[in-house]
Amino acid sequence: MPDDLLNSFMTGPDENGRFGDFGGRFVSETLMPLILELEAQYEHAKTDDSFWAEMHDLWTHYVGRPSPMYFAERLTEKFGGAKIYLKRDELNHTGAHKINNVLGQIILARRMGKTRIIAETGAGQHGVATATVCAKFGLKCIVYMGAHDVERQSPNVFRMKLLGAEVVPVTSGRGTLKDAMNDALRDWVTNVDDTFYCIGTVAGPHPYPAMVRDFQAIIGKEAKEQMQAAEGRLPDTIIAAIGGGSNAMGLFFPFLDDKDVNIIGVEAGGKGVNDRMEHCASLTGGRPGVLHGNRTYLLQDDDGQILEGFSISAGLDYPGIGPEHSWLHEIGRAKYVSITDVEALEAFQLCCELEGIIPALEPSHALAHVMKIAGDLPADHIIVMNMCGRGDKDIFTVARALGWEMGDVL
Ligand SMILES: Cc1ncc(COP(=O)(O)O)c(C=O)c1O
């Protein structure tokens, strides 16, 4: 692990996995030994050069890192203000940032002698990344996916099956990411001997939030180096979309100590942040509680029952948020805003038309916020936005939302 990131490990979480009042380890007795074993393995790997050498080799030759830092000239011209750069993590193998983290967890699983990998997925990108890496290493792969997500992300379901994974549709709740994660946790408790749970975001019990963040921090580390090379300085503002918050933590983490850099996380505002909870903006519209093994901001009713969020984007459709984001929100180091489905769809179309990049619906939310603020900023203000996924998986959803029949788009 490079020295600059190693030093940052001292800033959090504490030994109980707490970021301030958030995070921790709220799990059953049965899971505790597994979690402690994973923590010990990860603590060892963090300072093991051979672990990071294997990661860097795979990041370079299998994933295609470093992902480019691209100056979005026509978007910049269109808004006439800040310079807009896109960190192109959608160009990674499998089309999103998720594989950065999956590689780390699968290398750990192999070191622990685990042969059966389980994962949850929302948009399907984490499921595809897990199925991909399992195929590469000859590991059994089972992916839990909400039945609603199976339907709206069908291209990714097909990809997972081609890659040899078993996809288990989850029909409880509203059939989305929260429900898939519940079932994956249940599987883990019942198959403790051979199974490794590969979590796709900075959520879950400690050590997952910190571990996933550390594996994704390659995004921010590269972004720093690339901005120094391109502009001779750090950006003024960095922006990323948030489901559970892994691509955002990956970009933000290496910048946390750079106090002059503004950090903005963009949650899914769905149909608008209102009392009917037709959104997934956990920080903007939720309050602290416990879900999936950690304490964080959640969408919940007065009795603490988790509410089903809503977003056009399957990857942002999670009623919680990683605990480190809750902490950054409370200490004011990062600002969190929300973007509606309609605004995200506008940004999606503009990016296609002006830059020749079809973005996933998730980063389209971040882009919509860039579009809101860029015009009011001076020309020497630099924005870096994480383009964390490509939009192939979303074309059917977008077609439906725009009222197009796939047969007669011409
Ligand atoms: C392309 C893409 N971006 C973002 C997300 C949201 O996840 P996270 O907030 O952990 O980055 C997902 C989740 O599936 C995704 O597929």
Image (cartoon, rainbow, N blue to C red):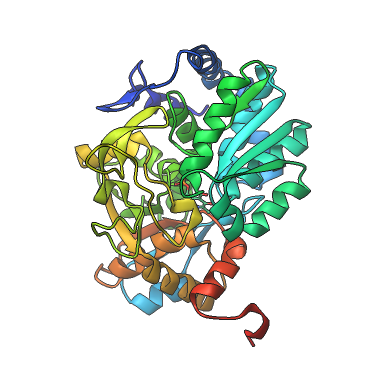
Horizontal side, residue 206 vs residue 172: left or right: left
- Residue drawn at x 67%, y 81% as measured from the top left: 407
**In the rendered image of this protein, does residue 212 appear above or below residue 343?**
above
219 sits to left or right of 254: right
| Residue 66 visible in the picture | no
Who's the residue at 42% across and 74% down the image?
346
Q: Position of residue 71 (x, y in %)?
A: 47, 65
**203 vs 32: above or below:** below
Residue toward you, 209 or 262: 209
Q: Which residue is drawn at 46% across and 45% down?
A: 173
- Which residue is more in the foreground, 269 or 134? 269
* Position in image of residue 20 (x %, y %): 25, 27
Tell me what residue is drawn at x 45 percent, y 63 percent: 364
Please give the count of numbered marks on the rendered protein. Answer: 0
- Is residue 107 shown to the viewer in this render? yes
Image quadrant containing the C terminus: bottom right
Residue 408, percent from left and from top:
65, 86
